[in-house]
Image: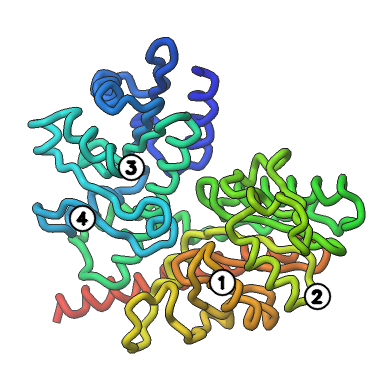
Amino acid sequence: MIRQLEYYRNKIQADGQINPASLLLLAQDDETVFCGCAELRSLLAEVQQQLGCTCLLVGMPLHPYVDLLLAGLPPSAERVVPLDTETRTFLHDIPLVRKQELCLRGAAALAERLRHRKGVIVEGLGLVAAGALTIEQAYVNFCSLLHATTVKVLLDLLVEPLPDPALLAGFEPLWDQLRMPLPLEIAGLTPFDTHSETEVMTALDIAGRRTVELGLVDSFFGNISVAVEDAIYISQTGASLDRLPGSVDLVLNDDSSCAGLSASSELAAHRAIFSATADQTILHGHPCFSVILSLLCEEECKTTDCWKDCARVRLLNGVPVVAGEVGAGGLARSLPGVIGRCRLALVYGHGVFATGTNDFAEPLSAMLHFENWCREHYLQRLNLRIRTRKENYEY
């Protein structure tokens, strides 16, 4: 059990988005075992005892997302509802626990929220996620919580009143990071023989791991596939792209096997894209700034549920942005007609789908270039807002 805790702690630390000193993982086996911050052990142990869950994970983001989020909300706010797809389909909403309530009620405040949700944002502590049965569940919930919080806070900086300059200054390390493009290193992603299962599996494994290493997919989300003569090799639902061996299904196009039952929920979208194009590879990730800019729609319309009902196709640096309900066939209708133009498409609040001929170098390279453009464009828009505020203040 302790080795599992150390494995997921190391994964989180390698991602570089959480303050290592704030990180704590707790798991219940024959006894309670801990990995990380000693100061929080008694609190988390009490929360675990009240919940009866297997694992808890807590950590404070390296950048002041929590402080900025809470500063922009009224003291009475009990939850936030980010607009990204992971929140919509997985978290639903994110409860909040203020420092005053934590001091008054302690573990009971956290346990009460976590009985109904997979994670909670806690003032002074950061993000807390629970795994009902496994450590892996807590890790997935924590990563989803981090992704949703990041997307909400950074999107708010473009659409809501800007926070106090002193609070915004805490993000300077992030802005410096964004000024450095993601590396375009895609070595090893060479063309492969789709008639060779060994070559297909190797290509999927290498591409999946590289996608995760580059931060283009969050948690266990995203998917990957290869089209062969009468079937599709596709990652299973819930599969981690950096641990694909044993988590890839071969799904026959005539559905004469049961493999499709465990395949990615986006199997229908992959099939539709392959049918509409001559490509043989698809890579789907959730690059953070691509997701943020997909949500930044400035068109006036009366659509309420933009994420599934919008019929318009916007363009972002020439890349089509479409809507479509995830996992329910919506993307199978909206993606095939647009992705062939540049072999890349962005889904509202959800991420990027990219295609290639018979390798993953093309889709991964396209996704990297687009995310780099989104990072640069985000900074330009934010700097313009900051400069305008300064000029108005001086005036």
Looking at the rendered image, the disc whose residue lies closer to the viewer, 4 or 1, is 1
CA gap, disc 4 and disc 1: 42 Å
Q: Residue at x 39, y 76 (%)?
A: 306
Query: Mark 1 sits on what residue?
Result: 331
Q: Residue at x 88, y 57 (%)?
A: 194
- Mark 2 secondary-structure assignment: loop
Image quadrant of residue 81? Answer: bottom left
Counting residues from the start of the chain, the first of labels 1 and 3 encountered is 3
Counting residues from the start of the chain, the first of labels 4 and 2 encountered is 4
| Residue 278 circle label | 2
- In this image, 334 relative to 291: left or right? right
Q: Residue at x 29, y 73 (%)?
A: 159
- The reply to whether discs 4 and 2 touch (Cβ–Cβ < 8 Å) is no
Q: Residues within 10 Å of mark 4 (few under 14, many from 20)?
A: few
Query: Mark 3 sits on what residue?
Result: 119
Query: Mark 4 sits on what residue?
Result: 166
